[in-house]
Amino acid sequence: MGWEPAPPSPGRARKALHAARRGLGVVDYTLAKRALLREFHQGLLSRLEICDAHPELLRAARYLGTQAPHPCPVCDASELRLLAYVYGDGMNRDNGRAFEVGEALSMAAGRGAACYVVEVCTGCSWNHLSEAFAARSAG
Ligand SMILES: [Zn+2]
């Protein structure tokens, strides 16, 4: 599952993700996300509990986010955006900063860092870790 079954999209984020897969190990968080959404639909979690994006995250999503290839799983709006955080020893002051997805992936690949792609809905504040990429050492 993951990104593959989504209809073809010219989105930059999607292309960047595909490119990054060639050099980076990928962890897909689809299952964890589904479990959370199922609990929401069953009424075990309230919208307030799962749509808790920090104002800082919402702002980053507005400025750096690229349009996600699917609508928001909670409010169904097309306000879902992807952005990325990069963590690694070689990142120095860029450690933990939010970046546009494509930029973050190439940076992570170049510096042996880990890249976390987060989906954020600027409509309802839903947010979840979408995918994580860990730089793989060659050979
Ligand atoms: Zn939403």
Image (tube, rainbow, N blue to C red):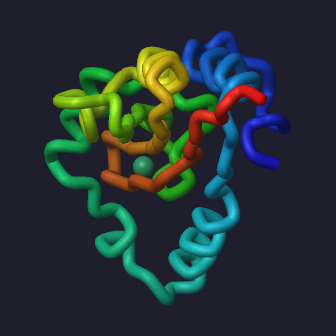
Residue 100's image quarter? top left
Residue ID at (56%, 53%): 73
**Side of 66 where 1 appears, left or right:** right
Looking at the image, residue 58 sits to the left or right of residue 133; the answer is left
Count of picture labels:
0
Give percent across and percent down for residue 45. 44, 82
3 with respect to 109 (left or right): right
Q: Check the picture and name the quadrant holding the C terminus.
A: top right
| 74 in relation to 105, above or below | below
In the picture as drawn, the residue positioned furthest to the front comes out as: 139
Residue at 30% over, 71% down: 48
Q: Residue furthest toward the bottom?
A: 44
Is residue 66 visible in the rendered image? The answer is no
User: Which of 90 and 4 lies nearest the eye of the viewer?
Assistant: 90
Task: Identify the residue at image location x=41%, y=32%.
Answer: 83
**Is residue 104 something one can see in this rendering?**
yes
Q: Pick the residue in front: 121 or 20.
A: 20
Residue 126, position in %: x, y? 39, 55
* Residue 10 to residue 113: above or below: above
The relative height of residue 44 versus residue 18 in the rendered view (above or below) is below
User: Residue drawn at (24%, 41%), measured in percent from left and top?
Assistant: 58
- Please provide percent x and percent y for residue 79: 42, 35
Residue nearest the observer in this picture, 9 or 107: 107
